[in-house]
Image (spheres, helix red, strand yellow):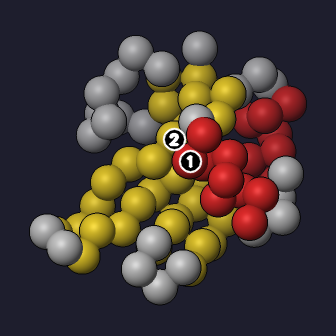
Amino acid sequence: MVKLRLKRHGRKQRVTYRIVAIYAQSRREGKAIKEVGFYDPRKEQTQLDAFAITDLLKRGAQTTETVRDVLKRAKVL
């Protein structure tokens, strides 16, 4: 099963996240299938590829709760 979830980037105290499509059994820093967005919680910035996200969701990808909240705030869902 494929999930849309956050992949941590950055250094200590300056974390940013990439929103990636990844197999559910993979670890957090594992190899992603596709990178579909960016999220910076400190600045509340998001950059999303809405077309790729909707395509993955139509194909049956699941989202984590955090990614679902980010997508709702960005009005993609």
Q: Residue 58 at what x, y percent from top left?
A: 85, 30
How many numbered discs, if any?
2
Which of the two labelled residues, at mark 2 and mark 1, occupies the earlier sequence position?
Answer: 2
Label 1 crowd (10 A; few <14 / some 14-19 / many >=20): few
| Label 2 – label 1 distance at C-alpha | 8 Å
Residue farthest bottom in this picture: 43
Q: Residue at x 74, y 47 (%)?
A: 53
Q: Residue at x 32, y 36 (%)?
A: 28
* Residue in the picture at 41% in, 60% down: 17
Q: Name the residue tied to disc 2.
A: 5
Q: Vertically, is 55 above or below 13?
A: above
Locate residue 23, reporting x and y percent: 48, 22
| Location of residue 44 by image quarter | bottom right
Cβ–Cβ under 8 Å for marks 2 and 1: yes
Q: Residue at x 43, y 37 (%)?
A: 32
Residue kind at label 1, given as amino acid type: Thr
Q: Determine if residue 33 is in view.
A: no
Q: Quadrant of the N terminus?
A: top right
Q: Where does residue 55 sit, x and y in percent of width and height?
A: 81, 40
Which one is in front, 67 or 56?
67
Name the mark nearer the viewer: 2 or 1.
1
Looking at the image, can residue 8 be seen? yes
Percent position of residue 68, x then y = 68, 46
On screen, residue 14 above or below 62: below
Mark 2: which amino acid?
Answer: Arg
Is disc 1 placed on a helix, strand or loop?
A: helix
Q: Is residue 5 left or right of residue 62?
A: left
The residue at which mark 1 appears reads as 66
Q: Secondary structure at mark 2?
A: strand
Pointer 2: residues within 10 angstroms few (<14), some, or many (20+)?
Answer: many
